[in-house]
Image (cartoon, rainbow, N blue to C red):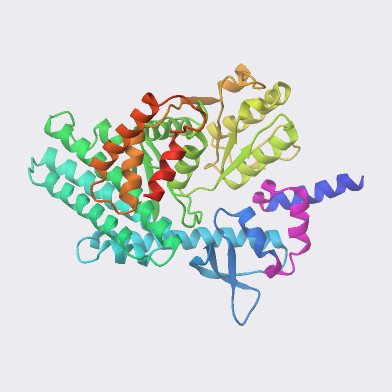
């Protein structure tokens, strides 16, 4: 009975601050027991937020949180909260306030950044722009610049038959890339700052390539106007002044940016495979289904899901599934996801035992139904009280087919997910981007040579165990270069 009352106490706390569902009972007890001493839970913020390593308290009033920080090594990135959070009373209440304040502050940064986008390369240098804002916001900024310029160029070229606009926009994108690559050669102060600029290069190389591709198709009269599918299928970023929100559109699905503080994280090199995966996953979410990337190990199933979450400013919770998972463990995670509106990625989902999977099917079905009805609350299997549903919730499962100890998914579970098959990515693109992000100007030529070299090594050399020409090896060689 003691165990039962403890469980119901923890459940009550978790219902108030849903992110508590993602930490274990002992950790949660530790956090709750130190709730009156806000400074003693500094180490636990990382478990509850994507990138908050520490918070900074007011110098005078030690109960007021004024800033949040992400720390990597000796470097740190600091965000000022738009209003200080009072760390008094129950811990779940002020953590909830901190979460809301974090989103408000990131949204404020995005708003300021969107006002500055027009001035970039037009009186304000890219370096000035990127240094003014935190990593995720400056990244969103160059994506907004690209979207606006791209759309305008397509419109003028096709509607007004303006011959100059496409080459002019292409020149601007080329110049932006050249500037970013040259900053990577200079001393950027810290490893964190270097990651920030390398990420800008990673994303912008893709943006430049896409523009050149669509420009070529426009010349061949394959692209009619700015509503052509070639442009619509891309991941596009807008700032809507009327709603005061950042919107991310993929094909016909619009997502509101979630403003989770993400710190400075490396982003994946976007290959055609990634684009197709984004397209399928966003369509799945648009139709209120889950996504299920499947394919051999090392094709980036989990990473692509996490990366898509980062594009939308969402915290992605990754769970490694095993045959030890029981339906209660799964229920806990799903309840947490629904009430906090985060994304869950269940890795190697088909290792869970069959009888557990059939209960999970019921759980997922109840969420799918509630999302389709646009319900605010819904009854979750095994719960007496209805639970809240935040519409931005998403769930993804990754599967490795055909290893020992893997299950086939039951049919009633399969229908709730849209599958995406992932194949080996195009290495040449990845090499090109990695070379660009460390400051090589001739990345296209070098990438091609490097790819041919690796292909020859793989095909010609004898098949010995220590010969590894996989992606990880390539990246380590590029790092050394």
Image-based side of 108 in relation to 144, left or right = right
Is residue 199 located in the magenta-colored stretch of the structure? no
Is residue 26 located in the magenta-colored stretch of the structure? yes
Image-based side of 338 in relation to 83, left or right = right
Q: Quadrant of the N terminus?
A: top right
Residue 223 visible in the shown view:
yes
Q: Is residue 254 above or below residue 33?
A: above
Instruction: Identify which residue is drawn at 73% across, 22% down.
Output: 355
**Residue nearest the observer in this picture, 346 or 231:** 346
Identify the magenta region: 17-40
**Residue nearest the observer in this picture, 85 or 29:** 29
x, y percent for residue 387:
67, 42
Count of marks, rendered view: 0
Residue 242 visible in the shown view:
no
**Residue nearest the observer in this picture, 481 or 232:** 481
Instruction: Identify which residue is drawn at 31% across, 64% down.
Output: 186
Q: Is residue 298 above or below residue 83?
A: above
| Outermost right residue | 1
Give the dominant element type of the magenta stretch: helix, strand or loop. helix
Image-based side of 252 in relation to 224, left or right = right
Q: Is residue 60 above or below residue 289?
A: below
Instruction: Identify which residue is drawn at 23% across, 54% down.
Output: 178
x, y percent for residue 64:
62, 73
Instruction: Identify which residue is drawn at 58% across, 71% down.
Output: 56
x, y percent for residue 260:
51, 54
x, y percent for residue 6:
84, 49
Res. 111 image quadrant? bottom left
């Amino acid at each position: 009975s003691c165990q039962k009352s403890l469980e119901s106490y923890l459940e009550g706390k978790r219902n108030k601050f849903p992110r508590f569902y993602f930490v274990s009972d002992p950790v949660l007890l530790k956090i709750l027991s130190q709730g009156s001493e806000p400074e003693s839970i500094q180490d636990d913020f990382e478990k509850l937020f994507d990138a908050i390593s520490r918070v900074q308290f007011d110098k005078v009033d030690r109960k007021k949180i004024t800033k949040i920080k992400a720390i990597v090594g000796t470097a740190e990135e600091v965000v000022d909260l738009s209003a200080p959070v009072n760390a008094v009373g129950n811990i779940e209440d002020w953590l909830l306030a901190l979460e809301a304040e974090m989103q408000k502050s990131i949204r404020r940064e995005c708003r300021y950044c969107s006002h500055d986008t027009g001035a970039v390369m037009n009186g304000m240098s890219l370096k000035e722009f990127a240094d003014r804002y935190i990593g995720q916001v400056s990244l969103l900024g160059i994506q907004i610049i690209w979207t606006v310029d791209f759309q305008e160029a397509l419109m003028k070229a096709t509607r007004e038959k303006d011959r100059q606009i496409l080459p002019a926009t292409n020149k601007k994108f080329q110049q932006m890339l050249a500037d970013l690559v040259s900053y990577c050669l200079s001393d950027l102060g810290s490893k964190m700052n270097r990651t920030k600029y390398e990420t800008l290069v990673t994303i912008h190389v893709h943006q430049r390539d896409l523009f050149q591709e669509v420009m070529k198709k426009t010349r061949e009269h394959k692209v009619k106007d700015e509503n052509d599918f070639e442009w619509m299928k891309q991941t596009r970023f807008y700032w809507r002044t009327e709603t005061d929100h950042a919107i991310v559109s993929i094909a016909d699905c619009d997502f509101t940016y979630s403003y989770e503080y993400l710190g400075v994280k490396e982003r994946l090199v976007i290959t055609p495979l990634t684009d197709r995966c984004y397209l399928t996953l966003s369509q799945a979410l648009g139709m209120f289904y889950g996504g299920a990337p499947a394919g051999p190990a090392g094709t980036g199933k989990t990473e692509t899901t996490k990366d898509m979450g980062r594009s939308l400013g969402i915290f992605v919770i990754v769970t490694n599934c095993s045959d030890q998972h029981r339906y209660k463990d799964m229920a806990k995670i799903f309840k947490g996801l629904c009430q906090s509106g985060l994304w869950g990625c269940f890795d190697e989902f088909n290792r869970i035992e069959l009888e557990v999977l059939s209960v999970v099917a019921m759980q997922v079905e109840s969420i799918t139904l509630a999302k389709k009805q646009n319900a605010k609350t819904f009854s979750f299997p095994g719960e007496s009280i209805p639970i809240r549903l935040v519409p931005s919730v998403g769930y993804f499962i990754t599967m490795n087919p055909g290893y020992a100890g893997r299950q086939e998914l039951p049919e009633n579970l399969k229908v709730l997910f849209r599958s995406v098959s992932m194949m080996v990515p195009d290495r040449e693109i990845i090499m090109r981007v990695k070379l660009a992000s460390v400051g090589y100007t001739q990345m296209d030529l070098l990438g091609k040579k490097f790819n041919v070299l690796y292909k020859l090594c793989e095909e010609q050399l004898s098949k010995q165990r220590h010969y590894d020409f996989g992606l990880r090896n390539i990246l380590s060689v590029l790092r050394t270069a």
